[in-house]
Structure formats: C-alpha cells, structure tokens
Amino acid sequence: MKILSIALAFAVAIVIGCGGKPSPAFVETEQTEERISINIIDSIGVEIGDSNYVFASIDALAHGPDGNIYVLDRGACCVKVYSPRGEFIRRISRKGSGPGEITAAFGMAVLGDGRVSICAPMQGGIHNFLPDGEWEGLSAEFTNNPPMNMTGADSNAYIALKLTVDLVDGELISEFLIGRYEEDNEPSVYYYETEFQLDPTDLTGLLNETLFSHEFFADRSGNVYLSQYSTEDYIVNVFDRDGNQILQIEKDVPHVEKSPEEIQEEKAWMESWLRNLGAQGVVIEYNPEPYRWTISDIGCDGHGRIWVRRGTELVPVFDVYDAQGNSLFAAEVKGIGDDAQFWNFVIDEYGIMAYSINPDYYSKIWLMEISEEKVESEQM
C-alpha cells in the first residue's frame, strides 16, 4: 500500500472548511521472471540519542542535486540534511513564527537548482531556502489550497497536486490537478486535471478521487512519470517538461485480492492516523479497496531506467524498463518480506532509499544498492 504525504489531513480540513499533444510511443511489455537483488547497506535514524538522528515523523524524503539526503521531519519542524553515507550535515528551518520558521510543514521539494522548498501554508505559503539553509523568502503565497505531495524537478520547478473546492449552484464542486510549479501560485504545465461533485460525507471517495488517485515522480531533466492508482490497469505515462506525453508503458498484471488481515490493518491504521492528525468536522471512516493497486511507486535511476513497484506484491518488487519502455529485469529488496508494505521508496540518479510511514518502533531511512545476486522467485 502506498500512503501519500501528511498533507492529506490538511486537504481534509480544506474540504470541510470550505489538448493537442504529440502521440506518445506505446510499449506493451511481458512479465520478466528474472529478479536481481536490492540489498540494504545502511540506515539513518535511532530511537534515542543524538537528536540529529532521531526523527519525530518522516513526511518527505529526497536526494538533492548534490547527492545529499533531505528529510522533512514534520514533528521537528525542519528539514534534516545528510551526506550520501548518512552523516548529519545541517538543519533547514526550525519551529517558530519568525522569518524562515514553521509550525507545520505539508510538503518538501529539493529543486533542480539545489534550493529547498517547504510548503507551510500556516506561515504564508512556499518557503524557499538556499542549500546552506539560508531563508530566501516566500516563492508563492498559499494560506489555503496549497500544492501537496511535492517532488522536485529541473531548474526551479517542482511537481505537485492541488485540490480546490467551490460552491456552485448549491453544490460542492472539487477541482483536482497535477501540475508543474515554477515559483508561482498557478502551475505552468498541467499533467492531469479533473472536476467532480464532492460528497463531504464520503471520505473514502474523496481520497480515491484526489490524494490516492495517482503516483508521480520527476527526474532532473524535467520528465514526469505518472500512473493512476488502479486495481486492474498497469499503465505508466511519461511526459516531457512541457506536458507532451512521450511514452506509455502498459502490462497485463494479476488482479490480486487483499487478505482480510491486510484490509483491517490498512483501515485501522488510516483511521488512527487521521484522528492523530486532528482531522475534524468529518466522520473518520475509511474503507480500503478490496484489491491491491497494480503500481505503488515510480522512479528513474541515473541510467535513465524506469522503476515501477508492483503493488500486487507485498514484498518490494520492481519492474525495470529502459528509456524506450522495454522490459529489462525485475528487482527485489532482499530479506524484507511483507514488512515493507508501508514503505515509501525514492529511486533516482543517486540511488535507492525508503522509509516507513507506519514504523514498528521508530522512524528510520534505509539506504540500498543493487546487487549482482539473483533472487529466486515464482512468476506471478
């Protein structure tokens, strides 16, 4: 299961309070049986001890163009920066109401130019910081309906989703989009947009239409990899920085039903999470999909290979494609099993890392590398 960022609670609060493109290349792939191994080589995070390595709550994770690791620790009201080997470097921002300080962060993106953007609508909008932590000021002002689930792209851009709700002829109408933002309140490019009538009593429907509707990732050349969460269709669409669709990957996958234990765990955890975040004015009742999503993570490594995590398997398994969408191999995180059900992965030119949004004991980041060792697995 893929649970998106902590901005979910803010989106719930918002709701309660309130063309001609070139034809893309199309590739239909066959399932590969060969799996290589992904090994965990190190981790960042301790239960007690040095506060620089203790995470209150990890809510975003990214590599910067310098290769350093950036972690949004929402509970600590800051971004913690580490070297590629996990050595602490600095903190960006802190708790407070002064210039460059925040009390609640709802997203983070490390931009292609190395600056760090933190979404803090309670402090006025998108706060920009230089790589050394110096506050530049607000790059866009948002006190409501902010961009959410931010991911850094090229130059000064990030990709994010946005949900707005308007009262039209007595009905609540929701507008939802995924777009490219370049230090402005409005996106410069739209990758997806839709409009629908909102039922504020249907929390599950709202989430499935918006925050749980798509998985997306951007590389440093500005390409955007986008997949709609589905229990049946396995489709990855790739766009260039101008919004032109340049590739589509599609594959037949099994329709996998969740076990009763999976459904109960997901339901209990989600409802508890929303209550702990202080969501008010709505009945907290979440009804999970009875089937697993086909895709739960997307990334692109330094060789231009596209990594797609299979949502149909609880074990972390990725289908890996070349830049033309041809299947290369599958990769499995060795020795983890289904303990990684709640892991969020980051795969880019600087490597592979992950964190759990539902940690057993304390929050930590796992650093990984590809091994030449093959994993023996049964074909799905």
Image (cartoon, rainbow, N blue to C red):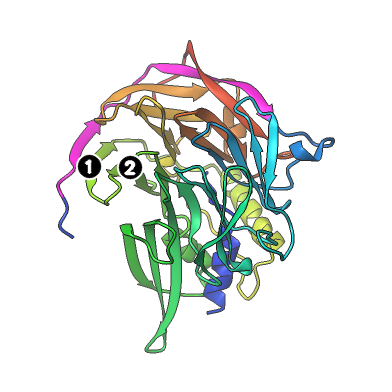
Residue 72 highlighted magenta (yes or no): no
Residue placed at 68% from the left, 50% from the top?
78
Residue 24 highlighted magenta (yes or no): yes
Residue placed at 64% from the left, 39% from the top?
81
Instruction: Pick out the residue farthest to the right.
Output: 49
State the SS at label 2: loop
Q: Is residue 331 left or right of residue 365?
A: left
Image quadrant containing the C terminus? top left
- Magenta span: helix, strand or loop, mainly? strand
Instruction: Pick out the residue farthest to the bottom.
Output: 169
Q: Which residue is mark 2?
A: 223
Estimate the spatial distance between the alpha carbons at disc 1 and disc 2, rounded to whole Å: 9 Å
Q: Which residues are magenta?
A: 22-43
Say what amino acid the circle numbered 1 marks: Ile
Residue placed at 15% from the left, 48% from the top?
22
Which badge, 1 or 2, is on the more N-terminal residue? 2
Q: Is residue 56 above or below residue 379?
A: below
Q: Position of residue 320 (x, y in %)?
A: 37, 27
**Which numbered marker is on residue 246?**
1
- Which class describes the residues within 10 Å of circle 1: few (<14), some (14-19), or many (20+)? some
Q: Is residue 203 left or right of residue 360?
A: left
Q: Is residue 373 left or right of residue 188?
A: right
Q: Is residue 358 left or right of residue 126?
A: right
Can I make out residue 135 in this image? Answer: yes
Q: Circles 1 and 2: CB distance less than 8 Å?
A: yes
Say what amino acid the circle numbered 2 marks: Asn
